[in-house]
Image: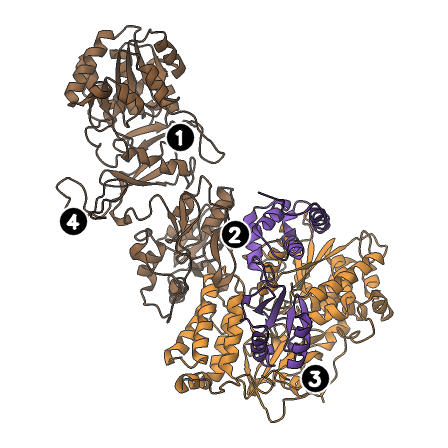
Chain colours: A orange, B brown, C purple
Amino acid sequence: MLPAAEKVITRNWGKPDSWTLEAYRANGGYRSLEKALGMTPQAVTDEVKKSNLRGRGGAGFPTGMKWSFVPKDSPKPKYLAVNADESEPGTFKDRYILENDPHMLLEGVTIAAFALGVRTAYVYARGEFKFQAERLQRAVEEAYQAGILGPTVLGKPFGLDVFVVRGAGAYICGEETGMLESLEGKKGWPRLKPPFPAVVGLFGSPTVVNNVETIASVPTIIERGAAWYAGLGTEKSGGTRLICLSGSVNRPGVFEITLQTTVRQLIEDERYGQGMPAGRKVKAVIPGGSSAPVLAAHEIDVELEFEALKKIDNMAGSGGVIVMDDTTCMVRSLWRVIRFYAEESCGQCTPCREGAPWAARLLRKLEEGRGEPEDLEILLHVAHSIAPFPPIGLGNTICALGDSVALPIHSFVARFREEFEAHISQHRCPFGDRPWGHYGALRA
Amino acid sequence: MSPKDNKPSSPPPPAAPPAKPAPKNPGFVTLNIDGKEVTAKPGTNLITAAKTVGADIPYYCWHHRLSIAANCRMCLVESSTSPKLVPACQTALQEGMSIRTDTERVAEVRRSVMEFLLLNHPVDCAICDQAGECKLEDYYQRLDHKPSRLEGGKILRNKRKVLGPLVVLDQERCVQCTRCVRFMDEVAKEPQLGMFARGSEEYIDVFPGQQLTSNYSGNVVDLCPVGALLNRDFRFRARSWFLSTVASVCTGCSRGCNTYVDFMGQDVYRYRPRENDAINQSWMCDQGRLSYKPLNLARVQAPSLGRADDRREVTAAEALLRATAQLKAMAGTAELAVLVSPSCSNEDLLAGLTFAKDALGVRHLYVGGRPDGAADALLMRADKNPNRKGLAWVSAGLGLSLEPFAALLKAVQAGTVKALYVLGAEVPVDEAEAARTLAQVEFIAVQATNVTPLTETADVVLPTATHVEDEGSFVQEDGVVQRVRRAFPPRGSTRGHWNWAVDIMREFGFPLTYESARDVFRELSPKVPELASFGWDSEAPPLKTQRGLQPLATGADGRPPGYREFGAPRVRGI
Amino acid sequence: MGSPFFSAEEQRVFDAKLSEILAHYPADRKSAAMLPALRLLQEMKGWLSPDGMRLVAKALEVPPERAYEVATFYVMFHTHKPGKHVVDVCTNLSCSLRGAEDLLAYLEAKLGLRAGTSNEKWTLRETECLASCGTAPCLQVDEVHHEGLTRGRVDALFDKLS
């Protein structure tokens, strides 16, 4: 039996009024902040480092190390930018943190700001998160009133301002430098790197960009200690993880799991997905948001952990696990994914800007039964031209959106080639007008 | 959430970067490009550095005077510093790094970028002004050379969006390199262009209802690596491969921007800026760009005698005889005045002023020239004459003083001037009014390039060559002497100002042997200390930088095939 | 130019709210307020007209081209007047696996317009993933989430709005 995960992020979810300061304090909130303020900033950073906390936004970069890149002696102000632009298809965890426990995020922000010497922090919420941004804003106001934010934090000689900023509908602003551009009031065109944000970030100043879940993990690390947190995880990554389960599964939702949980366990466990719909089998699972390579049914015994997925040329990504059953059309699914990236390409780099819509067009042709054998080769070549694979990360574009176009194509075609070929040879989609699997019709 | 942000292996830099290797050549960066060692100054762009060892890295978006966008992805190369291909334009040179531009992986990505760029490109080269000087064409020939694999229609967009008085945009041809946007922001500092929308739908445009009115708008046409931004003045006028090119300078103001003159036969079709770091960088203003028009239009082409209705065209000999007879009679008297334009070249001034001093015996000169106009902080100057400094130098060298144009008008109105010799018919006041006043003078001889009210009132008109029809030099406002090269022989019976001056002097009896502007400069410049040291030959740009194709025999009239009289095309039956 | 873009009262509200927004950014980074400032304008006027964008750009001391770039880059900004209600339907993978394509077709029929088009009353669009994959299918009406949709819930929701 799979061990139950310690509740780190979700511990207050479902409690009455969990989003209020009162409830958060009643549940032990802001004690970590007090503890952190009694430490030196360096000690806080070291604690985070030792906790093996890794970024939950998609890349899984060690958080403590990221913090240590910020130049100590910069004459410029430093910034913390929290990435709440949750928009990777299949991902919906940060949203629930903002809804259920905004103060946990704020406590993390405050601790991180103290460790980093930051006096101003921005939380960038995607434009569609109107409700979530407003709830966070109320939490910020409560915190100011309670003396947690403002010129002094809990009476200590350390001040912090937190501002909630909303995007306006652009996936690319989830890319950290696209987000910084957007925070600066511009189009979300990702920046050239180097320099990295830790050195030249928001307003030209050193900036740490962390995901909501990452920052929300910090209070618990300080409270329970790095060793305890690291012990929850694996050798190289500490803590638990929020996983977003969606698609053709009996109980979709957000679950806090141990990193040792496999994709199969996530789908089948009674505490999580509760299995596949009656009579249906897993056909394919995307384990880390729609830009991650797809897994076929025989590959789903992989742990939802950074290194384990990396080992099989996949990625933990944003924790968006999308399940497709055996009556789901893979061509249709891939077309849907690629169409999204084509629409969300920022338009800077030629391969992504031109390649993604071309791939979408080819997939449409295939799905509609108009494909020819060479179309599949062209499709693969387009993907290869945007980002060769494997390994992950060879994209020919400024940011990784190019990779996000290429990886699904490479992986879908590699695993389900017969199905693509069937579309060509039968001159139609074998699934007819029911391509979306068991739950694919709108219920009455 | 940013699953995409660092998903590829592009981790931030290590906490403590490894100690950099000691430079092999102190003060320089030494690296390896395609197996060849390259030593470059720190900060050199990799594309530039690669050129020194013959590695010609293709690019669209990069421009050495604009910020780096690295968006076209054409310059991707292999680097020992990254598993990914890196854009050469953005990659800082590092000691000991190894770059490969000649591998199959690089060739493949170049082919694929070409294919992507051409995917929705209309490939309407047959009707595109850029054809022949288009980077898409060039790189396609060099790197890709494959038919399109796109099936079905291309995305259709606006093919003739007028952006402003000088620029029209074909959105279908755009490769989204953003050079034009960056130029307007960073150089012109008039951010009138933007890249709107996003992804494959994005497009260059002006703000709704606005126009691209900048005086530097023409530069975006030069910068556009493809045929998207077009010069409305040049559009559909010539195929680029029929144009010949010669290096020159703009004579539109005292800035002296370096130019290329593109011409066919004896018509100039356009100016383009020529790189000069000290003077105009890579740019020129629209006013200067359009200042070529008088080279073609309203030219004085033949010598003539007689005012207004009595005017008749004569031979050069006849005109010279008449001018000599009249001027000789008054030489040395206070009744003879000389008007000189600061638009003349140094050689014109050297010969013309020598004539004025030695033959006509004047002690001072009245200064004409074009009136002051608008100026800006970038290149355009209020003084619309290209050689005021040269005039100051030459007159001082010859011991002649300069008087303002108003003094001439006053003298004429007072009746003290009976004869006027004019070197360059430009005047700094209302031309018609000036001509009416000057008409009181009994005898006027004018050397002029273009028809003006003054040439209409002159007794003798000597048709003069323009700066593209003769060799010469000008001194721009900062005192830089710059050579211009001859594009084509003088039109009609025109001759250089210097040439007419020398001819009259011969009539006066001076035994001059000058046969060219070069002779004039060599013989007379020693009297002008500022010009004496100028390397007239050594500092001249190469004569013909590019020669246009002439695929068919020249016509009987000496004009190239396909020649159209300047202006509206002559189409029979329409 | 005719009448001013804002009435005196609107101008007062705009100025007050904008100065509140500007306080969130360094004094020399007024342009950073572009997104919130455009949102403010859109909330007041319903959409972003050229005159309005010019006004925002002027207030933030940037050229109007920058405002227009931002306005056309982000899908939640309307540079053309939208319908009275803006309906954004997620049809991404997770939602499609839960009936989103049916949902969109149902809405097209119900509202009488194709996705990607507008009329006086409605603007109907497909939108990016709305982070409601666990409660799919979903849509937003005027920036408010509606999740776990069924035909019945759609009817209830839209009949109320009509």
Are discs 2 and 3 located on one and the same chain? no
Alpha carbons under labels 1 and 4: distance apart:
38 Å
Disc tally is 4
Q: Residue furthest bottom?
A: A279
Alpha carbons under labels 3 and 4: distance apart:
81 Å
Quarter-of-image position of residue B143: bottom left
Q: Are dots 2 and 4 in contact, CB under 8 Å?
A: no
Residue type at tag 4: Leu
Disc on the earlier residue, 1 or 2: 2
Report the chain holding disc 4.
B
Q: Which mark is residue B552?
A: 4
Q: Which mark is residue A272?
A: 3
Query: Within 10 angstroms of label 3, few (less than 14), some, or many (20 or more) residues?
Result: many
Q: Please name the residue that numbered disc 1 is placed on.
A: B253
Q: Secondary structure at mark 2?
A: loop
Residue type at tag 2: Ala
Residue type at tag 3: Tyr
Q: Secondary structure at mark 1?
A: loop
Query: Within 10 angstroms of label 2, few (less than 14), some, or many (20 or more) residues?
Result: few
Residue A149 percent coordinates (x, y)? 80, 56
Disc on the earlier residue, 1 or 4: 1
Name the front one of labels 3 and 4: 4
The image shows residue B530, relative to residue B490, as above or below, that is above
Q: Are dots 3 and 1 in contact, CB under 8 Å?
A: no
Q: Is residue A190 visible?
A: no
Q: Is residue B82 visible?
A: yes
Alpha carbons under labels 2 and 3: distance apart:
57 Å
Residue B216 percent coordinates (x, y)? 44, 41
Alpha carbons under labels 2 and 4: distance apart:
61 Å
Q: Nearest the camera: B94 or B388? A: B388
Q: Are dots 1 and 2 in contact, CB under 8 Å?
A: no
Q: Please name the residue that numbered disc 2 is placed on.
A: B22
